[in-house]
Amino acid sequence: MKALLVLFLSFLSAPALAQLPERQVLFRDDLQSVFKEIGTDGTFVMLEQKRGRFTVVNGARHTKAYLPASTFKIANALIALETGVVKDADHPVFKWDGIKRDIEAWNKDHTLRTAFKASAVWVFQEIARQVTDTRMRVYVSQFGYGNRDIGGNEDSFWLDGKLRISALQEVEFLERVYIGKLPVNPKNTEILKDIMFMEKIGNATLRGKTGWIPSGDNKIGWFVGWVERGDETYIFALNLDPNEEKHVAARIPIAKALLTQLGALPKQ
């Protein structure tokens, strides 16, 4: 399908539209083959932040909202820093409770940095409890995060509660993080960016977070983040239906392939 370039008018939610200049969107549904080739459905949204242009793969899905799963750890980490639940990326140390969990990397003491990298759910559940439901509601609302509804258990609402977010909203939120438009201490934003680091690819830096609900009616797979390359930053979000193990494993490779094809990552 030939790419369609249109003015970016109703594409954003009303609050974001009031804060951001008019954008353009390039629909690239011809690239949906990356999902179809592995037998699943998904979407990908990328914003060239300085240029102000969105690219959307699968326009029928990019505004559909899902549980954020572990991508909420981005917001949760920032809230932990803002509320003083954690001092910085490496303090305090959260002592392992001794409960043996399926993922071996979780079964040890963690700092914010190591818990983020390992996606250790129990650490972020403890953080959420210490933040408290009342403060969490305030920050999620101030951040404009998804539907802003943290109904459900205070330490798992991002996994099984009412919170929902679309790929487009993930990108909107991450842009606010990146450009410093959230009501937070800039120092804490820099700490967050540091722990989000994944790898250097040529002259590009990739930062991000995966997420996964493995079963049930709300199962979903995520990979969100951004690429810093030269004077441009490419903010992205991918989600897909994780019907098979191979779909879960494909989240990062598919995102990287699309980021490379769209010029955000250098060809290797």
Image: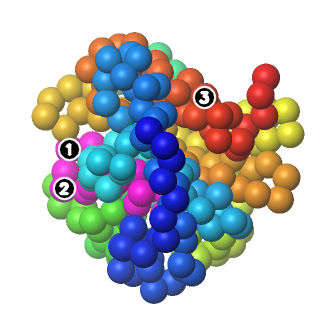
Left or right: 263 as drawn, with respect to 159 = right
Q: Decide if residue 168 is in sight here.
A: yes
Residue displayed at 19% across by 38% down: 218
Of marks 3 and 1, which one's residue comes earlier in the chain?
Answer: 1
Disc number placed over residue 160 in the picture, else none: 1
Q: Decide if residue 112 is in sight here.
A: no
Q: 10 Å neighbourhood of mark 3: few (<14), some, or many (≥20)?
A: some
In the picture of the structure, the residue carrying the numbered disc 3 is 257
Distance from label 3 to label 1 (Cα)?
30 Å
Seen in the picture, residue 118 relative to 112 is either above or below; the reply is above
The quadrant of the image that shows the C terminus is top right
Element class at badge 3: helix
Seen in the picture, residue 53 relative to 238 is either above or below; the reply is below
Residue 76, located in which quarter of the rendered image? Answer: bottom left
Residue 163 image position (x, y, % from top left):
25, 56
Query: Comparing marks 2 and 3, which lies closer to the viewer?
Result: 3
Residues rendered magenta in the picture: 159-174
Element class at badge 1: helix
Left or right: 40 as drawn, with respect to 20 = left
Residue displayed at 45% across by 86% down: 18
Residue 116 image position (x, y, % from top left):
55, 40
Element class at badge 2: loop
Distance from label 2 to label 1 (Cα)?
7 Å
In the picture of the structure, the residue carrying the numbered disc 2 is 162
Distance from label 2 to label 3 (Cα)?
32 Å
Disc number placed over residue 75 in the picture, else none: none
What amino acid is labelled 2 in the image?
A: Lys
Residue displayed at 42% across by 75% down: 9
Seen in the picture, residue 154 relative to 247 is either above or below; the reply is below
